Image (cartoon, rainbow, N blue to C red):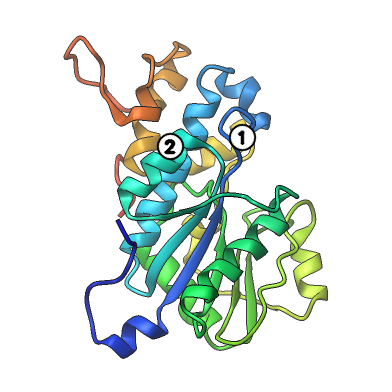
Amino acid sequence: MAPMRRDGAEGEAEAAWSLVVPLKPLVRAKSRLSRAAGEDVRPRLALAFALDTVTAALACKDVRDVSVVTDDRLAGERLAALGARILPDTPADGLNAALAHGARAVRARRPGAPVAALNADLPALRPAELELVLHSASQFPRAFLADASDFGTTLLTATSGVELEPAFGGPSRARHLASGAREITATGVPSVRRDVDTGEDLLAALALGVGPHTALQAPYLAAGTPSPAGGAATGTGPQDGSQRRLPPQVRASGA
């Protein structure tokens, strides 16, 4: 399926953002969650985060398409089914090289595209909040949004004709500021800032209300029991036909 906005006039579609989302192979993703989630659940959580992130991004009216840079076969299949374009990580040289590669691929197809790099670990992402952030970003050649800790970055944007110049990882807020990118200070967008690296981050995301793929995994985390094989990774429910009961802080909605 070719990811493309199907509504609105052609001019509106051409002006809409193309997002690039990087995703490590699931076996290596979200290593800092091992203590909170366990090794069996951690890769499933990483995929669930990405599925909820991409679902919400594609539902944002200012987003034309989403390209995911990943070499993970399962993740690629699941994300392509949502409508994302899957790009292999041919540079194989880390996060920023993958993002630059994704941006080049986007502009090879659509030279005038405004491009944004978006983290894959935003399970509480709301389309309306992403729209607010992208609207603010459109006022500047390059812009970024700091994460909830004000240390890292969850979104970096470059308008038409401007290079993305990603500097993610570690203290990326300071690096993006030093590179000349304008910091987005929009309020009321906690879901776009709430990335998940640790157990504490996950609790904060659950309190905001996560998307359905992450919510599907939450009962097993809360109960301290393993999920059924393929639970979050395949999107299937309990095999015995019983209904999952989500903890009160989880809303099974990314809208």
Q: Residue 6, located in which quarter of the rendered image?
A: bottom left
Measured along the vertical axis of the image, is residue 196 above or below residue 175? above
Neighbourhood count class around disc 2 (C-alpha, 10 Å): few under 14, some 14–19, many 20 upward: many
Neighbourhood count class around disc 1 (C-alpha, 10 Å): few under 14, some 14–19, many 20 upward: some
For the N terminus, the image quarter is bottom left
Q: Secondary structure at mark 1?
A: loop
Q: Which mark is residue 65?
A: none
Q: Are marks 1 and 2 in contact (CB under 8 Å)?
A: no
- Answer whether residue 142 is visible to the viewer in this image: yes
Residue placed most toward the observer, 254 or 2? 2
x then y, percent, for residue 230: 38, 21
For the C terminus, the image quarter is bottom left
**Is 74 situated left or right of 83 in this image?**
right
Q: Residue 143, located in which quarter of the rendered image?
A: bottom right
Q: To which residue does mark 2 refer?
A: 48
x then y, percent, for residue 97: 71, 58
Q: To which residue does mark 1 refer?
A: 29
**Is 171 situated left or right of 13 in this image?**
right
User: What kind of residue is marked 2?
Assistant: Ala
For the residues labelled 1 and 2, the Cα–Cα distance comes to 12 Å
Q: Earlier in the sequence, mark 1 or mark 2?
A: 1
Q: Residue 33, located in which quarter of the rendered image?
A: top right
User: What kind of residue is marked 1?
Assistant: Ala
* Residue at the spot 57% in from the left edge and 54% down from the top edge: 119
x then y, percent, for residue 116: 55, 69
**Is 176 situated left or right of 33 in this image?**
right
- Answer whether residue 250 is visible to the viewer in this image: no
Residue placed most toward the observer, 195 or 61? 61
x then y, percent, for residue 193: 56, 57
Q: Secondary structure at mark 2?
A: helix
Residue placed most toward the observer, 186 or 127? 127
* Residue at the spot 55% in from the left edge and 26% down from the top edge: 42
